[in-house]
Image (cartoon, rainbow, N blue to C red):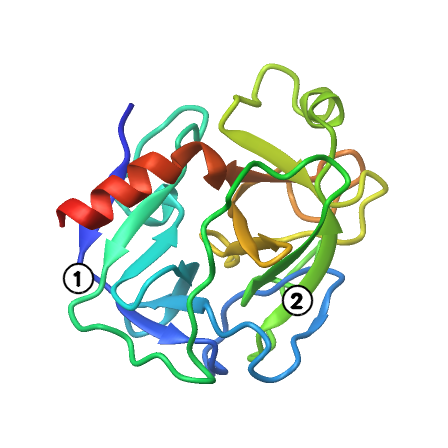
Amino acid sequence: MKYFILLALFAAAFAAPIDDEDDKIVGGYECRKNSVPYQVSLNSGYHFCGGSLISSTWVVSAAHCYKSYSSRNLDNDIMLIKLSKPATLNSYVRTVSLPSSCASSGTSCLISGWGNTSSSGSNYPDRLRCLNAPILSDSSCRNSYPGQITSNMFCAGFLEGGKDSCQGDSGGPVVCNGQLQGVVSWGYGCAQRNKPGVYAKVCNYNSWIRSTMSSN
């Protein structure tokens, strides 16, 4: 297995409005101010991906946000980023817990990001967007993407379409009952019928995350 660790390569902005034209959640709502204090923007002069602060020095994001990542099926689409300077934790900047176990289908989760809000075209507001969505069953997920879903992925959202994560949300958090269960990974378009969002299953990487943090 190949996972990615980036050490202090990106600036990280925490849950603040971004004034460039980037991307948002489709069919969601503007997050209540300071309600997602673990949300990170990977920023290189512009927002290009999301992330989740899991300690004062470590961020979880999607491996495909790294330009050198290459995978045919986006399996193991997860990476750790070590910040060059620890984040200052306070009432506005907080960490999110790693999962104690894998979440079951039907669990309601909060997905957040600065991704495209339009399923056809582009609409890029500058405020963090949120979406409440359930984890779908493995059978529904595999039926939506035959032969493409691995054990390291899960689907969340609505088979009828209309609500989804989208371009620019990549790497962002899927938080269920206060725990980071998913990382925004991929999908077919955005908010399309029978094509829900696909997410990296963080619970499968707990050991790797903890050992990497302790050894670096």
Residue 177 at x, y = what percent?
64, 55
| Residue toward you, 206 or 110 | 206
For marks 2 and 1 on the same chain, the one whose residue lies earlier in the sequence: 1
Q: Counting other residues with Cα less than 10 Å from the Cα at mark 2, is it few (<14), some (14-19), or many (20 or more)?
A: many
Q: Residue at x 80, y 52 (%)?
A: 162
Q: Residue at x 43, y 28 (%)?
A: 75
In the displayed structure, would residue 188 be above or below residue 174? above
Of the residues shown, which amino acid type is indicated by label 2? Answer: Cys
Say which mark, if any, is on residue 158: none
Above-or-below relation of 95 to 215 = below
Residue 156, x across and y down, in percent: 68, 42
Report whether residue 140 is seen.
yes
Q: CA distance from mark 2 to mark 1?
A: 27 Å
The residue type indicated by label 1 comes to Ala
Q: Horizontal placement of 207 versus 49: left or right?
A: left
Tell which residue pokes out farthest to the front in this image.
100
Crowd band around label 1 with a 10 angstrom C-alpha radius: few (<14), some (14–19), many (20+): some
Q: Quadrant of the N terminus?
A: top left
Lateral position of residue 27 relative to residue 152, left or right: right
Residue 141, percent across and down? 69, 27
Q: Which residue is mark 1?
A: 8
**Foreground of the two, 117 or 209:** 209
Residue at screen point 48% across, 52% down: 170
Element type at marker 1? loop
Toward the viewer: 187 or 88? Answer: 88
Which percent across, then down, holds residue 126?
A: 55, 79
**SS for dot 2:** strand
Locate residue 153: give its quadrant: top right
**Which residue position holds label 2?**
130
